[in-house]
Image (spheres, grey):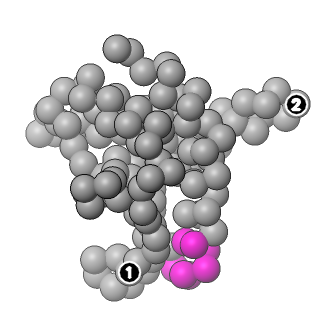
Amino acid sequence: MTKGTGVSGTRCLVDMGTDGRYGWRLVAQNGRVVAKSGGFYDDHAGCREAFAVLCAGHEAMAGGVQHTAGGNGWVWLLRDTEGRTAALSGRSYERHSTCRTAYARFRALIADEGPGWASTVLR
């Protein structure tokens, strides 16, 4: 949180990849990527809508910590009710405990800030 303001300074940015598809990333005030979208979207509006769905429905989503694809680190992820990855950690972690702590912080952040972020999505 920005000292004394009650505002975290965390923001959602939408990026376009080289293939023309869109993904979001949640960036902390210090510039670190907290989380990123679990999928890519054909248009900007679809990407923003996916982030809004995450913000509104995160409580019903399951998640946890698992090994990276290469097995040399840990990542956390959050799955929607259909089993698709909705969000994942912005980086891999060397230690399981550090990743688990980052996951818990993300869940707390989305619970605190998510309703406000969801309400700012263009409709």
Task: Quadrant for residue 111, please give it.
Answer: top right
Q: Is residue 25 visible?
A: no
Identity of the residue drawn at 47% across and 38% down: 55
Assign the C terminus to one quadrant of the image. Answer: top left
10 in relation to 36, above or below: above
Q: Which residue is mark 2?
A: 4
Task: Quadrant for residue 76, please give it.
Answer: bottom left
Identity of the residue drawn at 66% across and 33% down: 9
Q: How far apart are the two marked residues, 1 and 2, measured between alpha carbons?
A: 38 Å
- SS type, badge 2: loop
Assign the N terminus to one quadrant of the image. Answer: top right
- Residue 24: numbered disc: none
Q: Which residue is mark 1?
A: 67
- Tell me which amino acid carries mark 1: His
Residue nearer the viewer, 122 or 9: 122
Q: Position of residue 103 (x, y in %)?
A: 55, 63
The question of residue 96 being in magenta is answered with yes
* Furthest-left residue in this view: 19
- SS type, badge 1: strand
Q: Position of residue 105 (x, y in %)?
A: 63, 57
Instruction: Say whether disc 1 or disc 2 marks the residue closer to the N-terminus.
Output: 2
**Image check: 41 left or right of 108?**
left
Identity of the residue drawn at 41% across and 32% down: 52
Which region is colored magenta?
94-100
Identity of the residue drawn at 35% across and 59% down: 79
* Furthest-right residue in this view: 4
62 in relation to 2, above or below: below
- Tell me which amino acid carries mark 2: Gly
**Image check: 87 left or right of 33?**
left
Q: Kindly report the secondary structure that dominates the magenta region of the rendered protein.
A: helix
